[in-house]
Amino acid sequence: MARLIAFFLLLTFAASPIAAQIDPSARGLAVQAQALAIGRDARIATVIADSRGDAVYIDPAQYALNMRSALVWAKQLSGGRFSIGPTFGKSGDRTDQMMARMPQALATRAGLLYIIAGVNDLAQNYPTATTSGATAAGNIIAMAEMGRLAGIKVILEAEVGANGLTAAQVSQMNELNIRLADYVEGTPNVYLNDARSAVMNPTAGATTVTFKPGFSLDGTHEVSRGSYYHALTLLPLINQIVPPRSVLTRTGTELPGNGRWQLLANPIFATATGGTLSGTATGTVPSGWTAFGSAGTTATFGTQADPEGVGNNVTVTCQWVAAGDSCRLFQTVGSANWLPGDIVQAVTQIQITAASPCLAATRLELVTVGTLNGSATGFNYMDGYTATTTGSLGADQPYTATLMTRPFTVPAYTAKSYMAAYVHLEGSCAGTASFVIRQMPIRRRLSAPNG
């Protein structure tokens, strides 16, 4: 028996990452990670990163998912295969500084860890100009091993670099990427995505790297268009390692009166007419819904049968005149249909059928307002936020996106004002695009589905 126990102890030690075998602090993280390995689900993601991971959300409270993130785009383009929970990106961080936040990432329920890191090590020549690549690779690998030991699937991003890196820094970037590529080969549950050819100019020069035109505003961070093309390289990997899930409404019985599991009237646009036109909007709008076009915008709405027979779709042709112009579709939830303590989430699927170089974003928004602690207090959850200023370009080709806000617990308002769901179709310059909005429910979620 003693020999058998010794054999299993040896196996446990040998399976630990090298850092955990030689570093007491890393060993402590490894033990913590093993304790958290039960119940991981790759359909919940977290992030360790620099400012590029901080860009997953636009706000410190992490209510608003941002289109300047390839991970957010991948979530939408995958049909909503996964959700993004709390993330741990910090502007300016090197890989050694990110390591301190690994315990927070491991403490989440996430089963998918996304790491995008390295450019700050290179730009800061950390710890020296000739060792930044190897140092960054070692730290990224150590973090990946912590995640892997915790039962988490890990996606690493090859470093794409930034405009202005010196030839010596580019050399270190290449070393970093080679080390990561060699590490993932033969390492279970760790994957490498390489978006360099998608977002960087392949003919920039032999010793320089430069973003493609319109893909970055500052030479380091991608705008929505850059993140979209980045996500197209990430999408096959996501679809390989994360299974699909049911996120859309599939039946006309999901109405508030049937248990309040879905809170909006006419979520699949089954009643195709009878809605309200507002602002510059014209055309036909489903019952219960309001269509709006901002001043100067041509906003033409219509309906068509859903090709799968699930109610109808709303069609929109939106012609913007200037940056920030918008067409939108929205509905207010009946006061009796939402209660304090409800966990709610808005969902929609949008198809861009005729793209425009002026498209900034398709954005889903869930808003609640009421009296809390004696004051009017609102909460705004979004999937698809992006700036709509000139230069904030979005995708310039047709695509289909499934948008989902983060689940939100309605607070104990002493008086309720309103809850509403919106789809915004926003422009960053003068142009026209066509859209199909498939459906828009607000789902009531459960904290304990097994009762």
Image (cartoon, rainbow, N blue to C red):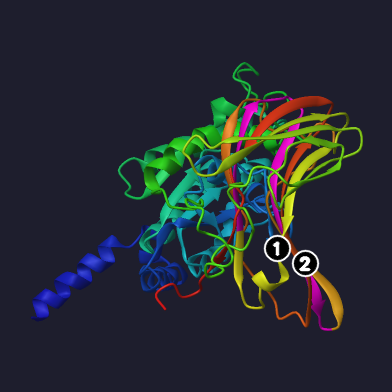
Tell me the tag on residue 418.
2
Residue occupying image coordinates x 67% and y 27%: 211
Task: Look at the image and say whether residue 362 sits in the magenta stretch.
Answer: yes
**Image quarter for residue 90?**
bottom right
Q: Observer-nearest residue: 408 or 200?
A: 408
Question: x and y percent of residue 138 in the render?
Answer: 47, 50
Q: Residue furthest right?
A: 295
Q: What is the quadrant of the C terminus in the image?
A: bottom left
Sequence-first disc among 2 and 1: 1
Q: Secondary structure at mark 2?
A: strand
Q: Main secondary structure of the magenta part?
A: strand
Residue 132 visible? The answer is no
Question: x and y percent of residue 15 in the render?
Answer: 28, 61
Residue range in magenta is 346-373
Distance of label 2 from label 1 (alpha carbons): 7 Å
Answer yes or no: do the residues labelled 2 and 1 have beta carbons within 8 Å? yes
> Which residue is disc 1 drawn over?
333
**Image quarter for residue 57?**
bottom right
**Where 417 sits versus 172, above or below?**
below
